[in-house]
Image: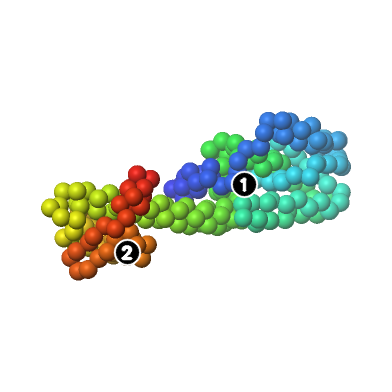
Amino acid sequence: MTMLVQQTISLLAALPAFRPISSERRAMVAQSLQVTAIKKQTPFVLTYPPATYYLLPLTPNLTLHRTSNVTFGMRLPQGVLWPVTLQPNEQVQIRCVTEGQLGILSTRAMVELLQLSPRVRQALMQSICLSESHISSELEQYTCNDLSGRVARLLLDLEQSASSNIIHYVHVQLAALLNAQRESVSVIIGRFRRAGWITTSYGRIKIDDHNALLRLANHY
């Protein structure tokens, strides 16, 4: 559980919903959040501006006693909304924070939030899984592009060191020189061939567009 919490915290910074809002916006929210008659067991009215609010099951700074139904909402990343309704005369302890304030919670406070609220933890993990999938996709694309540049550079170097303009290498040999998967190198070689940059036959590669390969090699 501790490892799960720590992994969750380490990924929170990547979630757009947890980017802190400006200090001016936080100050405006704080000024707009008004509580009257805060004494325990005394009915009061809570008003707040249109914004995203979270109910955190942390050490409370207010003991609230309500005389009418009031519904709050915890809006989490990816649009997940968990409504929290207080029944008439129900006394509860909550702590209201804005989205920006949630973004600057301490590690200890975030650990308490994840441990004490299974619904929040579930929503956060769903969001993190989506974010991790997106990051993995971008990393895979970057790795593929980077390998394309390395293949282009290798072909140019091999041609320069060869006695002719024909490179006598098969895909598995190229992959070994690049410490890459043969299948990945074959895909890239096929892409170069379809683009008209190279001409290939078994064990033979001829570069037809040096400038295109050079641009790719210099880009990554």
Camera-side residue: 124 or 209? 209
Residue at 25% x, 62% y: name it.
Answer: 182
Whole-percent x, y for residue 73 in the image: 73, 52
* Residue 83 visible, this angle: yes
Which label belongs to residue 43? none
User: In the image, is 219 to the left or to the right of 199?
Assistant: right
Assess disc 2: are there few (<14), some (14-19) or many (≥20) residues with their C-alpha within 10 Å of its C-alpha: some
Does residue 70 appear left or right of residue 134 in this picture?
right
**Mark 2 lies on residue:** 193
Measured as percent of width and height from the top left, residue 36 is found at 86, 36
Q: Which mark is residue 17?
A: 1
- Taking the spot 48% from the left edge, 57% from the top edge, the residue there is 133
Residue neighbourhood size for the residue with mark 1, other residues' Cα within 10 Å, grouped as few (<14), some (14–19), many (≥20) = some
What is the three-letter code of the residue carrying label 1? Ala
| Residue closer to the observer: 204 or 119 | 204
Location of residue 80 (image quadrant): bottom right
Between 203 and 143, the one lying in front of the other is: 203
Q: Is any atom of residue 147 visible in this view?
A: no
Q: SS class of the residue under badge 1?
A: helix
Q: Position of residue 58 (x, y in %)?
A: 63, 42
